[in-house]
Image (cartoon, grey):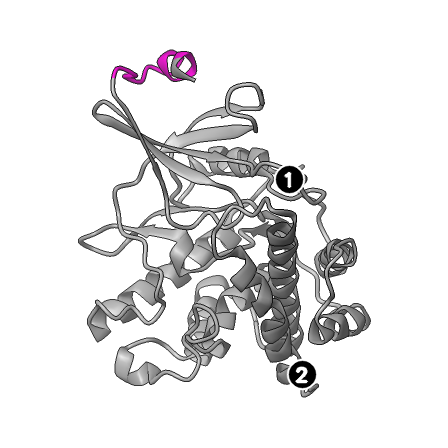
Amino acid sequence: MHTYLDQLGLDTRSIEIESLVGGQSNPTYKIRCGADCVVLRKKPSGKLLPSAHAIEREYRVMSALASTAVPVPKMLALCEDESLIGTPFYLMSYLAGQVFHDQSLPQMSSTERGAIYDEMNRVLAAIHQLDYRQIGLESFGKPGNYFARQVSRWSKQVQETTIPIPSALAQLIEWLPHHIPSDDETTLVHGDFRLDNLVFHPKDHTIMGVLDWELSTLGHPLADLSYQCMAWRIPPALWRGIGGLDLQYLGIPSEEDYIKAYEARTGRNANADWNFYMAYNFFRIAAILHGVAQRAVDGNASAQDAAENGKKAGLLAEIGLQGLGIH
């Protein structure tokens, strides 16, 4: 590994390695090489679910975004040779900014909270306004039929696991294929766009970089928007949400106002089929967490709280059913 870092022009006479918070799916490390800092992101060890942990796709999409208005770290190298550290990995620049894990932003003023949420909205809209063909991502996914393909994909991954499937998740797997909207549009989608996947500048709170592109693909932009809007319906006690909080007091926009800001920036109408989009995303996050629970059982989860997060799959699926009036 020293030789590999040497070839990238890094000072390997002094190396310090630190595991970074997050990286639920793919282990992530900060490596200090002399005066330089880089980030290493790798696949987890052990048996993996099909198409999961696609760090190669992360590297490709962030490389393509380097020339756009969407802020991302600089990509340094992709290594698919498993002999170096046991799995494929990539290296990118380290962004010395702030990452916020509590979406209520307790350390901020109401004015700052409003600015941070508006900045998130601006960058999400910027992702969806890109022409993915112009930046070489025309083969990054299949245009059209996004929801049908995603529902099928995640349902299959859930059904391939060996642990019990929560009842609410099973109900969503049954309901969703029969209620897919006829509206169809294709843009680049992040797939996991939320507050703690963003690095903010420590002074002006602009976004320095959007991280964790593992689930990105070509898809429907409103899938991305509704994914982020799940936070408004998830209580903080359950899982990193702002549901039930006094948003007006905090200076955080309501779900409705956040959607309106996105509509103003993109010209899209997000209201049609909104209940489907929300149910789809609660199904999807529940399916992901169900996979986390499976990895915990298999003993190759990358985060210590994997088993705990896996238990939340059924509770989040329940919120998705409630939004449809199904209990």
Q: Is-magenta flag for residue 126?
A: no
Position of 4 with respect to 323 (left or right) is: left
The residue under label 2 is 324
Residue 204 vertical placement versus 230 (above, below): above
Q: Answer with the quarter of the image where residue 253 lies.
A: bottom left
Front residue of this view, candidates 187 and 95: 95
**Segment tinted magenta in the rendering:** 3-13
Badge 1 amino acid: Phe
Q: CA distance from mark 2 to mark 1?
A: 32 Å
For the C terminus, which image quadrant?
Answer: bottom right
Front residue of this view, candidates 265 and 223: 223
Question: How far across and how far down the image is residue 285, in percent?
Answer: 60, 63
Residue 134 in view (yes/no): no
Question: How far across and how far down the image is residue 296, in percent?
Answer: 60, 52
Badge 2 amino acid: Leu
Residue 82 in view (yes/no): yes
Residue 202 vertical placement versus 252 (above, below): above
Residue 170 vertical placement versus 33 (above, below): below
Position of 10 with respect to 170 (left or right) is: left
Determine the residue positioned at 32% across, 53% down: 99
Work out whether mark 2 precedes mark 1 in sequence or the reverse, and give the earlier one.
1
Q: Label 2 crowding class (10 Å Cα cut-off): few <14, some 14-19, many 20+?
A: few
The residue under label 1 is 140
Position of 46 with respect to 244 (left or right) is: right
**SS under mark 2:** loop
**SS under mark 1:** loop
Q: Answer with the quarter of the image where residue 105 lies.
A: bottom left
- Give the numbered dot on residue 114: none
Determine the residue positioned at 69% across, 45% down: 49
Question: How far across and how far down the image is residue 237, in percent?
Answer: 43, 76
> Which mark lies nearer to you, 2 or 1?
2
- Whether the residues at callouts 2 and 1 have beta carbons within 8 Å, the answer is no
